[in-house]
Image (tube, rainbow, N blue to C red):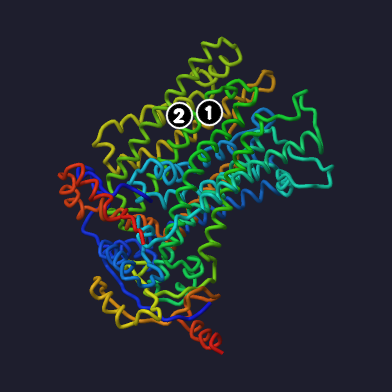
Amino acid sequence: MALLKYESHVRPPLVEGTKTYHQVTEDIVRPIEARPSMLWWAGFLIAVACLLFGMYSVYREVTYGVGQWNLNKTVGWGWDITNFVWWVGIGHAGTLISAILLLFRQGWRTGVNRAAEAMTIFAVMCAGQFPIWHMGRVWDAFFVLPYPNTRGTLWVNFNSPLLWDVFAIGTYFTVSLLFWYSGLIPDLATVRDRAKLKWRKYMYGLLSFGWTGSTKHWQRHESLSLVLAGLSTPLVLSVHTVVSFDFATSVVPGWHTTIFPPYFVAGAIFSGFAMVQTLLVVTRKVLKLEEYITIEHIEVMNKVIVLTGSIVGIAYITELFISWYGQNKYEMAAFQNRYDLSTPYAWAYYLMMGCNVLSPQIFWFRKMRRSLFVTFFMSILVNIGMWFERFVIIVLSVYRDYLPSSWTTYYRPTIFEVGFYVGTFGLFFTCYFLFSKFFPVIALAEIKHILKKSGESYKPKQKKIEEESAEQLHHHAHGVHHDEFNY
Amino acid sequence: MAVKKFVVGCFDEEGVLFDGVKKVRKAGYKLHDVYTPFPIHGLDKAMGLRDTSIHSAGFLYAIFGTTTALSFMTWVFTKDWPVNIGGKPNFALPAWVPIIFEFTVLCACVGMVITFCYLCQLAPFVKKHHFHPRSTDDLFVMVIEPTPKSNVEEIKAFLQTAGAKEINVQDAETGWWLGRYDKDRKLFEERKESSLA
């Protein structure tokens, strides 16, 4: 996308090593053209095994009913909705990176956006499973769509946050998919034009839609990406806002708070970036893409993690403060069920606090931000913490309701409830393994676009430009490319 | 579509290509197109292409989405099947904002992508002539169409001086056809005969 023509030489390069355009293509397309390694097969098969167990768990649930799970009258939303919110949250980083960072002109997004967007799509696919199968009578799932029917026509309730969710998640998935795929088309064309094998030519020919790289097409493509980014930016913020409305518009103490939308969005970005780190720290190593996903990229994302983690921390403390400040006894009781160490789930609350608020503070130290081991470890920790955040919000607010006789003693999931969750991991990683094998995991065209100003071997030239006067710089940056033609 | 003769010049530096485009236009040759592996900013202007108005199309789709969502929900809840939900107003505009917004975005995005594919003629099984296989890798390919006023040799010599690394002449289909990329040029050959017949 339109970035500055000049970038300060003080900024670390985004592409390391001496690269030509052809070398970029070679490096990024190599894993697609090579045979998958044993490591890939091992990971892929484990993912498929998890997916199969998940499918069996879902089969049990559909055949025998939601009673296969340990949900009951009091805890009606347990693991499934926790997992739903968790996956949706993870699905926020990709669009954030590709849309918001594009509008903010952050050059480093080019190295990570493709994989992050793919991750977003897979995470939203996983998230969508939970409300659908939670319906119990899943064969009636299409009732959520507003279509003329023989029941009246009895329409869906447009005032319900649960229906807003259907629209929000549905739109988010569709838009993310279109954004991702429209960016992929030129890169798939690159793979197609290099292909030697017949099936590869056929497949990538099919997938790349006959892309040629015509200037007019690029012009439209640029415009399309920019507008999609502009539309995705409020969209990505709206999705978790709407998810938080599922809780915030209810009358359950602990849920009924106006802080939820910004708090959920910050948490979503937080967990999304953690998942991006988990995947990319491994992907860059296995696919030998360290020169494109550099330690700088990792560091920048760790900065986002410490920022959003701290925002989430402030939200936790604000929530706690307001429950005391409001002096509503039900609200206070709901929070006592979290922080009071004598309550059965207090450990979940403190685990959440530890993982989400305290541990990311380690990223104030540059050395820690740049350590791959610490990054990977922390990304796992943050994901665990964010899962427990949703668990704390959902289960800890409902397991002791207004009537003490209906309190649950201790809600714990069944094997099929866990199996369903494991199954979505299977789905996620099966998709990710296939993606990393068959698609360019880095946006080729975008890397080439920034190569000559952010590539390591081109950086010294930027220094020369930087020493020029303002007029010269202006001429240099705009002169060649913006000449007006008056023929 | 028609099969035409083209003179093709391949550049390996975008700076040289830029100057080349300027010179082509100054010399008055008919520039068919320039194929690049990544978007080059300002090249469209240099070639004299007008700005795309695909974003205006997006705006229209967005307006369509907003009005459809708003009018549909209004009709459903006030005319077709008004439901008394705790005595709240049937026309519950604030509660509809999320769906109106989501539907606006959905219509704009889907509409724009379809428009983009239509304008660029992109779809599965669409095949187009590629002047150079490396035009999606690292070459910038400038294609000039000879006219009665300009001859092929002259254009070739011109491209040479403009700094093209590789120059050749190709007969090519200008449009697209249904085809597969694993069947090398075969369909194109067949079509050439049939279009001449």
Amino acid under label 2?
A: Met
Residue B56: x %, y % from top left: 53, 49
The secondary structure type at the circle numbered 2 is helix
Q: Which residue is mark 1?
A: A392
Answer left or right for A28 relative to A396: left
Residue for point 43% across, 23% down: A314
The quadrant in which residue A250 appears is top right
Name the one closer to the observer, A362 or B56: B56
From where the camera sits, is residue A444 visible? no
Q: Earlier in the sequence, mark 1 or mark 2?
A: 2
Residue A16: x %, y % from top left: 24, 53
Q: Are marks 1 and 2 in contact (CB under 8 Å)?
A: yes
Chain letter, disc 2 residue: A
The crowding category of the residue bearing disc 1, from other C-alpha atoms within 10 Å (few below 14, some 14 to 19, many at least 20), is many
* 3D distance between C-alphas at marks 1 and 2: 8 Å
Q: Which residue is mark 2?
A: A352
- To the question of a shared chain for discs 1 and 2, the answer is yes
Name the one closer to the observer, A239 or A478: A478
User: In the picture, which quadrant includes the C terminus of chain A?
Assistant: bottom left
Position of A88 relative to A31 (above/below): above
Position of A4 relative to B33 (above/below): above
Please give the label number shown on residue A55. Answer: none
Amino acid under label 1?
A: Val
Residue for point 51% across, 15% down: A322
The secondary structure type at the circle numbered 1 is helix
Chain letter, disc 1 residue: A
Answer left or right for B155 relative to A392: left
From where the camera sits, is residue A309 visible? yes
